[in-house]
Image (spheres, rainbow, N blue to C red):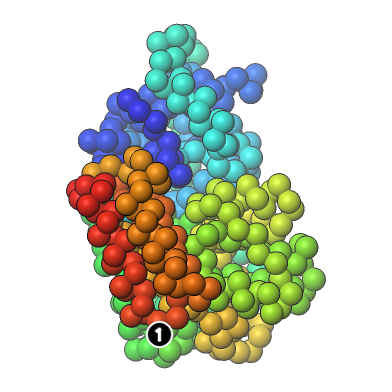
Amino acid sequence: MGKLFGTDGVRGVANREVTAEMAYQMGCAATAYFGQHTEGQPVILIGRDTRISGQMLEAALAAGICSAGGKAILLGVIPTPAVAYLARLIGAQAGVVISASHNVFSDNGIKFFGGDGYKLLDSVEAELEELLLGGLEKLEKPTGAKVGTIEYRTDLAEEYIKYALSTVQGDFKGMKIVVDCANGSSYAVTPEVLRRLGAEVIVLHNEPNGININDNCGSVHLESLQAAVKEHGADMGIAHDGDADRCLTVDENGEVVDGDHMMAICALKLQREGKLADDTLVATVMSNIGLHQAMKKAGIRIEVTAVGDRYVLENMRANGYVLGGEQSGHIIFSDVATTGDGLVTALQIVQAVAQSGKKLSELSACMVTFPQLLVNVRVKSKAGWETNEAILAAIREGEAELGDAGRILVRPSGTEPLIRVMAEGPTAEVLDTIVGKIADVVRKEQGQD
């Protein structure tokens, strides 16, 4: 067994790569690790999305926790950020989410939050891996009254709803909003919160059946949301991914407002309110050049991190920044949340529209997006690509062609057998040629899966 944890926990095909046996072992290891820091019985929350494999992995995780003497609290289907919030709220030692986020239904994953609501540091994940890869047989198995227990607390979703409502001021009366729940974990929560705030809500893709999560819907398939916003004459549309830790929006014209534009809107709002710490926004290397230009014009500095909301958050926590995120819609408001929260993000954008008296398209015009092209190259192996001379030469050739008018970014996916080739520049035609050449070399050198 090799390295388990990627950029967002463990992820793979359910029952083949992410198995019940693995989940059981992870439950044991997590209970042993987090139990070191409490005198009483360690308590671990488990939440999941709507995938058919979620119940299998939930049962196995809970069994592992009980086997190591812990208490497993099962939250049922609930958004990822709710698990982070509830772990803090009830004083649990950790929270676990069973989800593969935006991936197809046949995939699943397991990711952890500490009792403080934050994702685990790399060093903590390394210790968990060490337990999983050779230390479990050394663990003492409790017997008798010390065997662990399971508690079912689907009622705790209401506490998360109350929390989400507390993150905004005023109401959304008079607003018509279309919500795409991706047939995922937000299918009940987000529409309920918006309705309590007074909005008229039209809901799409909120009938999960175990296999339709992210199926031509949600934040990676916005077409039906765009059409519905125009059809209903809505003020805006909101789309989540399968576990609802991200959010993308659609304006009243059916145009996509991505994470870069949403960060720009929120950064400018916070700056006007005197709440943007050090006039700084944290973004990843994937954010568009247009965001950098818009923020520079407004006197806002951008800190750039590696891809992954965990790295954005690490920078924010280290420096006291309050806003950061990714183009994909993982946005963190650290004054109210410990992780990317799709519902909190949606509420912040709706509030910005409601308070401004402007349309979302007008707010989104605060930045202009440069043409960007991303090609995901499925490969047999990601190993060694960064030192492959043929790939490096293709990248250098593309950079020379773009000059100062754009940039190229090539990176491996942290969760899938993909190498991502991205470029920004003056025209789509130029980018198509440059990215196509690099992608062809990557396929040839790394093998096409």
- Name above or below for residue 317 compared with residue 327: above
**Image location of residue 17, percent across then percent down:** 27, 35
Of residues 165 and 288, the one nearer the viewer is 288
Q: Residue at x 39, y 44 (%)?
A: 387
Of residues 262 and 355, the one nearer the viewer is 262
Instruction: Kindly identify which residue carries mark 1.
Output: 254
Going by the image, does 288 lie left or right of 449? right
- Name above or below for residue 180 compared with residue 112: below
Q: Visible in this render: residue 42?
A: no
Residue density around tag 1, few if under 14, some if 14–19, many if 20 or more, within 10 Å: many
Looking at the rendered structure, the number of numbered marks drawn on it comes to 1
Residue 428 lies in quadrant = bottom left
Q: Residue furthest left?
A: 449
Circle 1 SS class: loop
- Name above or below for residue 293 compared with residue 389: below
Q: Residue at x 44, y 68 (%)?
A: 400
**Image location of residue 119, percent across then percent down:** 55, 42
Which quadrant would the N terminus be assigned to in this image?
Answer: top left
Q: Residue at x 40, y 82 (%)?
A: 427
Of residues 304 and 15, the one nearer the viewer is 304
**Image location of residue 176, percent across then percent down:** 48, 84
Amino acid at circle 1: Gly
- Name above or below for residue 344 compared with residue 18: below
Q: Visible in this render: residue 403?
A: yes
Of residues 400 and 48, the one nearer the viewer is 400
**Image location of residue 18, percent across then percent down:** 30, 36
Q: Residue at x 36, y 74 (%)?
A: 431
